[in-house]
Structures are given as structure tokens and as C-alpha cells.
Image: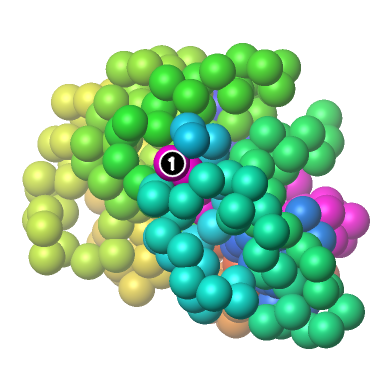
Amino acid sequence: VLVLNRVQANAQALLVAHRGASFRAPENTLASVELAWKLGAKAVEIDVHLSKDGKIMVNHDKNTQRTGEKKLLIKEALSNDLRKLDVGSFKHKKYKGEQIPFLEEVMATVPEDGKLFIEVKCGPEVLETLKENIAQSGKQGQMVIISFSKKVVTQAKAVLPEVPVYWLRGNYKAHSLEEIIQIVKEHNLDGLDVSYKLVTPAFAERMKQEKIAVFVYTVNDPELAQQLVDNGVQGITTDRPGWLRKKLKL
Ligand code: G3P
Ligand code: CA
């Protein structure tokens, strides 16, 4: 909330490093998260799933085929086996040996002035463990939960009322704009995190009227990013946090 006030006052936006600094380093690894902080990012976004043995693992897809060497379905795999995979080499050989991080490891990297946007890709069964991880991190005020799942965001707000929760939306297929606004209000969600394609001037104006905070994903084009800032978005998720910050002079 503090960040939002600051952002509104300066008509600026928080840049959120998408899967870490994923343009340069392998997404969702400690290397990409550390690089994002080093580049001056004040927020990082990562994706999480629950392993078979109940550990929260940082990975985008529900299986490891695209970024690991072989296909393990995270919810059916033990964290020990997931940790044996190399999820760095797919990006570049210099990242060979990067492991799928435990969420706790990523939390430990978050600097005092940083925010971690945790995208829950699995179901609400992860929330109790997430609550424990957040408590143990000692960084309660720095964590943010995002998810496309209505079940996850509504239950997250109930289980973790102090943690900001933003609902991810990419289109109006499942819910119309009016339904989205109604659900945000009914469940006291802190706002939306939407595809930049949804942010027309009319959308931005409506969200201002409704006092619904808007973050956007995923923007690497400075001109588009500037338009979105001018439209009043609170944050922009980008694969290139350092480069875009310089282009926008944020
Ligand atoms: O920040 C939201 C964005 O990460 C959602 O898309 O597919 O990159 O998880 P995806
Ligand atoms: Ca994501």
C-alpha cells in the first residue's frame, strides 16, 4: 500500500522483473532473481507450484520439460528429484547447474526495499504452506500474491488478509469487466494484474473511478510502457527491468 501511494504521488510505476531478469538469465532461477535486484529492480515476479512432498517450488510450467532436461510433473515429483534438474542450460551454458529454487530461497534474496510478487500457478492447497513460508521469511510486508485462479485469490485474501492480492486477467472469456470489478470488491482484493492489451484509456479511467489498482504484464517496449504509465497503471511487469528503467527514467 505504501508503494502504491508513492507511485500515485509521483505518477510513476513500479517495475516488476518478470520471472526475474528473464531476458538475460534463465527464468525463475536464483540467477535471474539476483540479477534483477543487481539491476536495481524494486520488485520481482516468480511462479510457484507445490511438489509431491509439500515444498513450494519456483517454476513457470507445471512440468519441467521446457526448462529442465526431462519431464517431471511438479505435483507428482519429490523436491529432491526436482532439485537434480539443470534449469539453466536451456538459456545458456554459462548457467549450467541452476536448480529449481525453493520459494524460501527466493524470499531470502529480497532486499529491504524489495517486493516479491508470488504467482500461484497451482491450486489453493498451497496457501497454508505459503503462509508458513511468509511468516518464516520475516518479510511479511514485502510479499504480494497474484494468480489467474479466482479460487486462489479469494482464498488467499481469507488465509492471508495482510498480504496484497492481485487477480491476473488476460481477457474477458471467463468473466466480463463488470463481473471482474464485482469480484474484486466482494472479496476485498487489492487490485488487478492484467495483460497490457486490456488497458484502454476507458479501462484505466474506470479503474480509477472504482479505486482498483492496476498492474500490467508483460511489457518490454518502452513506448508502450510509457503509455501505460501515462494511463496511471501502478506497476509494469517486464523481462528487462534494468533496460526499461533507464529508458523510462524511473
Ligand atoms: O505477471 C503475470 C504474468 O507473469 C502472467 O503470465 O505466463 O508469464 O505467468 P505468465
Ligand atoms: Ca507469472
Disc 1 crowd rating (10 Å Cα; few below 14, some 14-19, many 20+) is: some
Across the whole image, how many numbered discs are drawn on residues? 1
- Percent position of residue 40, x then y: 85, 54
With 66 as the anchor, is 37 left or right in this view? right
With 93 as the anchor, is 244 left or right in this view? left
Residue 153: in magenta span = no
Residue 155 seen by the camera: yes
Q: How is the image coloured?
A: rainbow
Location of the N terminus (image quadrant): top right
- Residue at figure coordinates x 70%, y 22% from the top left: 137
Quadrant in which residue 159 is drawn:
top left
- Percent position of residue 180, x then y: 18, 46
With 65 as the anchor, is 134 left or right in this view? right
- Percent position of residue 219, x then y: 54, 73
What range of the chain is rendered magenta?
33-52
With 80 as the anchor, is 214 left or right in this view? left
- Residue at figure coordinates x 15%, y 63% from the top left: 172
- Residue at figure coordinates x 34%, y 73% from the top left: 197
- Residue at figure coordinates x 74%, y 39% from the top left: 105
Residue 37: in magenta span = yes
Q: Which residue is mark 1?
A: 52
Location of the C terminus (image quadrant): bottom right
Amino acid type at image mark 1: Lys
